[in-house]
Image (cartoon, rainbow, N blue to C red):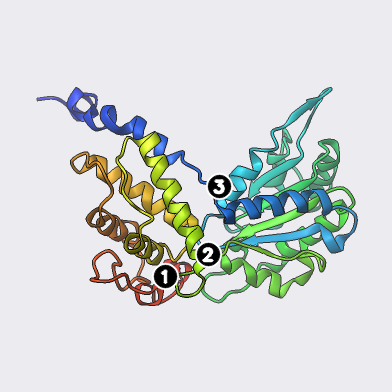
Amino acid sequence: MLKVAEQIVHPEFRALSDRFAERINAIKGIRIRNDRTLELIQRLHLFKDTASGTGDSAGGALTAPTRAGKTTVIQEFLADFPPVRLGETDCSPVIYCEMPSNANTVSLGAKLLSALGDIDPERGTAAFKQRRVIEAVRERKTKLLIIDEVQRLVAKDQGKVAHAVADWIQELMNEISRSCGIILVGTTRARRIFIRNGHLIGRNVPALEMKPYATRHDDPSDWKLYRSYLMTFDSELQRLGGFQKSHLHEEDMASRIHAAARGYPGATARLIHITSEAAMRLGDQPTLSRELFAHCFDEMWKFSDAKVVNPFLTPKPPAVELVWTKDWETSFD
C-alpha cells in the first residue's frame, strides 16, 4: 500500500490541478476596473500629489466593508509606483504596510521601517523608530505612506481605540507633512478611530469610501453600471477561463448576484471566482448556473450568521435587506 506522501504525488491526485489550475489562476487574476475602482484610484493619485504642505491636508482615509473591493484598489494603485533606483538609494514614491495585530507604537514603527527597507527595523524605542521613519521617508523621496488594516486599532467588543498608536501616527504625520501624506485604510470599524481622533484626517481632505452599486429601483443608471460590470466579467470568463456565456448581466441573475454581494464589486468578484472554480470541479460545467451560485453563496458565507436567505434559491430575486440582517463585519466579530 502506498504511503500518504506517495499517494499525494500519485498522478490521480494531480488530476484536478492538471486540468483546472491554469484556468483557475487566470480567472483569479481578472481585475475589472469598474467605475468605483477607477474613481478611488484617481482620488488616491490626486491625494498623493496634493497631500504635502500642511498637516491639515496630509492625512486621509479609505474605508469599506470586508470584501467590498478596497484591496483591489490598493493593489492597482501600488502597481503604478514601483521603486526606482537613484544612485545608491531606492526612490519609493509610495510605501505600503499593514497595521500589526495587537499593534503598539513599537510594532507599528518596526513595520513601517521594514517597508521602507531598514536593515534592522526592530532596533530602538518607539520614538527612535519614528525618527528613523522620518529620515527614511525623506531619503527615499516618499510621497505617500499607506497603512492598511487600521481597524485593528479598534477593539471588536467595546470599540475602544488604541489612542497611543493613533497619537503616534498623528505625530509622524505632523513631522512629514511638508513632503509626504498618509492614507489610513480599513474596514468600516476603522471609522471609530477618525471619530475619536479627527486630526488623523485633514480638514481639507474628504474620507474616501467604497460604495455599493444601487438597485434598479433606487438608481437605474447606477444599476446599469453594475450590469455592465457583470457583462464585462462574463466576457473575461469566456476569454480567460474557457467558459461559455453565462448571461450574468441579465435582470434576474444580476439582481440575485447584487443581493448576494450587497452590490459591492469586491464581494461580487469573489463570489464569481468561487463559482467559476466550482463549475470546473463539479463536472466541468460550461456556464455558471443559479444552482452553482446557490451552492457557492452558502460556502462563501458558511461562518457568518448575518445571512438569512440564499438569493439564488428564492422564486424571485430578494431585496438586500431580506438576505442580510446585519453587517458582515459584525457577524464575523
* Comparing labels 1 and 3, the label whose residue is closer to the camera: 3
Q: Position of residue 152 (x, y in %)?
A: 58, 61
Kindly identify the residue that appears in the image at 82 percent across and 66 percent down. 204
Three-letter amino acid code of the residue under disc 3: Arg
What mark, if any, has residue 127 been given in the picture? none
Q: Secondary structure at mark 2?
A: helix
Q: Which residue is mark 2?
A: 222
Q: Is residue 316 left or right of residue 229?
A: left
Q: Which residue is mark 1?
A: 331
Q: Is residue 88 above or below residue 124?
A: above
Q: Are marks 1 and 2 in contact (CB under 8 Å)?
A: no
Describe residue 169's horizontal placement relative to residue 304 as left or right. right
* Label 1 residue SS: helix
Which class describes the residues within 10 Å of circle 1: few (<14), some (14-19), or many (20+)?
A: few
Whichever of labels 3 and 2 marks the residue nearer the N terminus, that label is 3
Q: Is residue 106 visible?
A: no
Mark 1 or mark 2, whichever is nearer to me: 2
Give amino acid for label 1. Ser
Mark 3 vs mark 2, CA separation in Å: 15 Å
Q: Residue beneath label 3, please?
A: 33
